[in-house]
Amino acid sequence: MFGEKAVSLVKELHRCPPEQLHPVNEDLMRQVFAEMTALFEANKSDIEVNDDNKMIPSIHLRHSALEHNRRCVLAYLKQRLNKITQFRWDHGAVLPEEIQVNMQEHEKQWFNKYNKSLANYMLSLNGLDITQNTVPPKSLKIQVRCLQDYGELETDSGDIIMLTVNSEHYLPLSECEHLIKQGVLQHMGS
């Protein structure tokens, strides 16, 4: 039946957990493209060979299947880009290796261009980092535990804090949020 492979492509992406990115199913994509090519060629030959109107319903059916497959492939690719965009906001400018491994080269190029556009926009806002504080804080300071030896951290107030493994600190959220995203610190509260 027409379009089943394209629908399975979309279903596969929706089965993937939101915090993960599976590799592109290139084999299934090739099968969908092969089906689209076959549909196009069948329509082309029917139009060239038949001058009567008997083949119009089958041409319309194949064209609808062709459009359906195209929409499914575009939805699949768009959803992958949406996930990559969300990863930028969740993980910062450098994605974890387990995500980068599953990205194709054109997706990596798109991610880099998105990073540059976002950085240029933030520079136009006098350096305001709009990727931080996406959720309003419950308090200005939070309890954190250091997960690795980081060294010294100088706060805005001029205090120097030594971040060593398993040390706990009560720090302003604005000064430690980037370290939480990097995996240096862990937020202790809920």
Image (tube, helix red, strand yellow):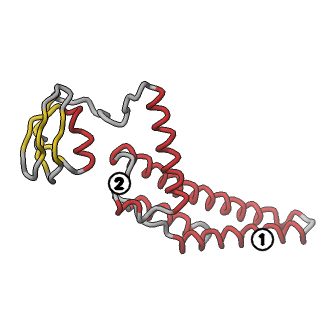
| Residue highlighted by disc 2 | 18
**How many labels sit on residues?**
2
Quadrant of image for the N terminus? bottom right
Q: Is residue 6 left or right of residue 98?
A: right
Disc 2 to disc 1, how far (Cα)? Answer: 38 Å
Determine crowd level at label 1: few under 14, some 14-19, many 20+ residues with C-alpha closer than 10 A: few
Crowd tier of the residue under label 2, counting other residues whose Cα lies within 10 Å: few below 14, some 14–19, many 20 or above: few
Q: Residue at 44%, 31% (x, y): give it.
A: 122
Residue in front for this viewpoint, 25 or 181? 181
Mark 2 vs mark 1: in front: 2
Where does the image place residue 52, in percent across and percent down from the top left?
91, 65
Residue shown at 13%/41% (left/top)? 190
Q: Which mark identifies residue 41?
A: 1
* 7 left or right of 167 in image: right
Q: Are marks 2 and 1 in contact (CB under 8 Å)?
A: no
Image x and y of residue 36, in percent: 67, 67
**Disc 1 on helix, strand or loop?**
helix
Q: What type is the residue that disc 2 sits on?
A: Pro
Work out whether residue 1 or residue 182 is closer to the camera in this orientation and state it: 182
Residue 63 found in image quarter: bottom right
Q: Which residue is depicted at the point 29% across and 33% down? A: 133
Q: Foreground residue, 178 or 31?
A: 178
In x, y percent, where is residue 15?
38, 62
Which is nearer the N-term, disc 2 or disc 1? 2
Above or below, 183 relative to 172: below
| SS under mark 2 | loop
* Farthest residue, direction right: 51
Compared across the picture, whether 186 is left or right of 68 comes to left
Where does residue 27 sit, x and y in percent of width and height? 54, 74
Q: Is residue 124 left or right of residue 134?
A: right
Q: Residue at x 17, y 47 (%)?
A: 185
Give the residue type that dot 1 points to.
Glu
